[in-house]
Image (cartoon, rainbow, N blue to C red):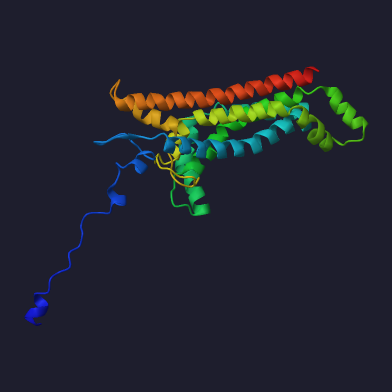
Amino acid sequence: MSSENALEPVEKVDAAPRPAELDFDNVPQTVRLWQPVGQNPKYSLLPLFLGSSLVALPATLVATLFGVACGVYLAEVAGKRTREIVKPAIELLAGVPSVVIGFFCLATLATLLQNLLHTTFRLNAMVGALGVSLVIVPVIATMTDDALRAVPGFLREGAHALGANNWETITRVVIPAGASGLVAAILLGMGRALGETMIVLMATGNAAQVTLNPFDSVRTMTATIAAELGSVPQGGEQYRALFLVGALLFTLTFIINLVAELAVARMRRRLAL
């Protein structure tokens, strides 16, 4: 090897990472991070709000499908003896501790879902949503049953007198008459899903990131409060930020419950006429 080749200058490599990789302190990143530790902590509510939404909305959708179906069956199809067995069994599901459901999601459901769908993250928002749906199915089913049984019997008798069969009477007369009660049941179920803590703390992966993919790991508002509030100094910046998260959660659930109560009141007025 010649001395000229041995003395060739080595091209300098910039060892400093690019701004996009190291920049956790610029404005675009600040509005998307919940990072309460470090020299410059960030308290963006966006990843927590999206995480709660990615759990509550799919959970409400799944629970609505099963809960409304169960409520319609109990109110319009099941016989008296069957109803006495099925309804307590559904309501018994509401008494299962949420930590038990969370452990089931953590140990079993997450693995089954990953093997079935080949997801990147074993613990994700969808696993938490399926776990939460088990909790709110009894709420929706019971309220749907009560709403449909409150529909006056003469509406059913009139539909049968006009030649409608049982299924047509249910879908075209009973359900539209009790629609406000069904909406209230769904909204109260959503409020219950937003307030669930232990299941989402154990099953969602607890990664505070901005994403709209239900198969990504997320962190909800309730999980953040439960995980961090007990270890922060009282009156500090993070302490106040967690109380802000709690205030936002309270406001959301209050609005949902208020709308549900208005829907129930509307149904009562319609059925009283």
The residue nearer to you, when weighing 262 against 113, is 262
Q: Position of residue 105 (x, y in %)?
A: 48, 40
Say if 167 sits above or below 229 in the image.
Answer: below
Quadrant showing the C terminus: top right
Residue name at image x 83 percent, y 33 percent: 169
Q: Position of residue 58 (x, y in %)?
A: 56, 40
Q: Quadrant of residue 1?
A: bottom left
Residue name at image x 44 percent, y 30 percent: 222
Looking at the image, the residue that sits furthest to the bottom is 2
Query: Is residue 238 found left or right of 80 in the rendered image?
Result: left
Q: Quadrant of residue 237?
A: top left
Q: Position of residue 221 (x, y in %)?
A: 44, 31
Say if 263 sits above or below 54 in the image.
Answer: above
Query: Is residue 96 found left or right of 34 in the rendered image?
Result: right
Say if 204 sits above or below 261 in the image.
Answer: below
Query: Is residue 210 found left or right of 130 in the rendered image?
Result: left
Looking at the image, the residue that sits furthest to the left is 3
Query: Is residue 39 found left or right of 52 in the rendered image?
Result: left
The residue nearer to you, when weighing 152 against 137, is 152
